[in-house]
Amino acid sequence: MDLIVVDLETTGLDTDVHSILEVAAVNVATGQELYFVPHIKPDQMMLADPEALRINRYYERGVFRKMLKSPADNVQAYRELFGMLKDNRLGGANPRFDADMLVRAAGYAESWHYRLADVCAYVSGALGFDPSDIRGLHDVCVSLSVDTGTEHSALDDARATAACFRAAALGPRSR
């Protein structure tokens, strides 16, 4: 079973209202990557939380230019992602949120192992932080000297998360 890190950028944090803007996945063992920008309709953008768009710099980074052309293209992209995740472990910096958003957006049942891997909890524990003080991805990256790339970019966040899982797995003697 492989660990597949998934990161999403979304129009907000309400899984019942908001939409996925970017999808990235990285297989921690093999380095295989998948990235796509789902096609979203104008009415979905009307529901976007302006703060979410500010944080992920959707317009500044020109993410909309990479958007898939149609909902039919989304079906193929999500099928590929769910195939990558099948019988593997989904991990990330906020994996429960990402899993819920994926299921809602794709309309598929979870194809991954039911236990999710949260890099923030994993690394916070590995570094001896108080269990009630789980750090965010930025702090985890800093603690492990991992380059964050462009923060709040799905692919860079997925790459950084995968690097954090790898670094934490090496243990303190190897860093």
Image (cartoon, rainbow, N blue to C red):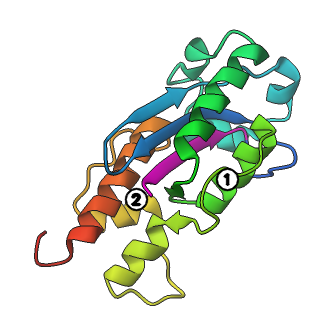
Give the structural element (helix, strand or loop) at label 1: helix
Which residue range is magenta in the image? 1-11
Q: In which quarter of the image is residue 71?
A: top right
Indicate whether residue 75 is drawn in magenta. Answer: no
At which x and y percent is residue 163? 30, 54
**Quadrant holding the C terminus:** bottom left
Reading the image, the residue beneath label 1 is 99
Instruction: Name the kind of residue labelled 1 in the image.
Output: Ala
At which x and y percent is residue 27? 40, 45
Indicate whether residue 2 is drawn in magenta. Answer: yes
Reading the image, the residue beneath label 2 is 138
Front residue of 164 and 51: 164
Q: Is the magenta stretch mostly helix, strand or loop?
A: strand
Q: Is residue 127 above or below residue 119?
A: below
Please state if 79 lies on the left or on the right of 118 as rendered. Answer: right
Please state if 119 lies on the left or on the right of 144 as rendered. Answer: right
Residue at image point 67% right, 24% down: 38
Q: Residues within 10 Å of mark 2 (few under 14, many from 20)?
A: some
Q: Specify the label residue 141 is tagged with.
A: none
Sequence order check: which comes first, mark 2 or mark 1?
1
Q: Quadrant of residue 115?
A: bottom right
Taking the image as drawn, is residue 135 in sight?
no
Residue at image point 68% right, 44% down: 51
At which x and y percent is residue 40? 76, 22
Residue at image point 44% right, 65% down: 119
* Tag nearer the camera, 2 or 1: 1
Q: In this view, does 138 lie above or below 25?
A: below
Q: In this view, does 7 lie above or below 114?
A: above
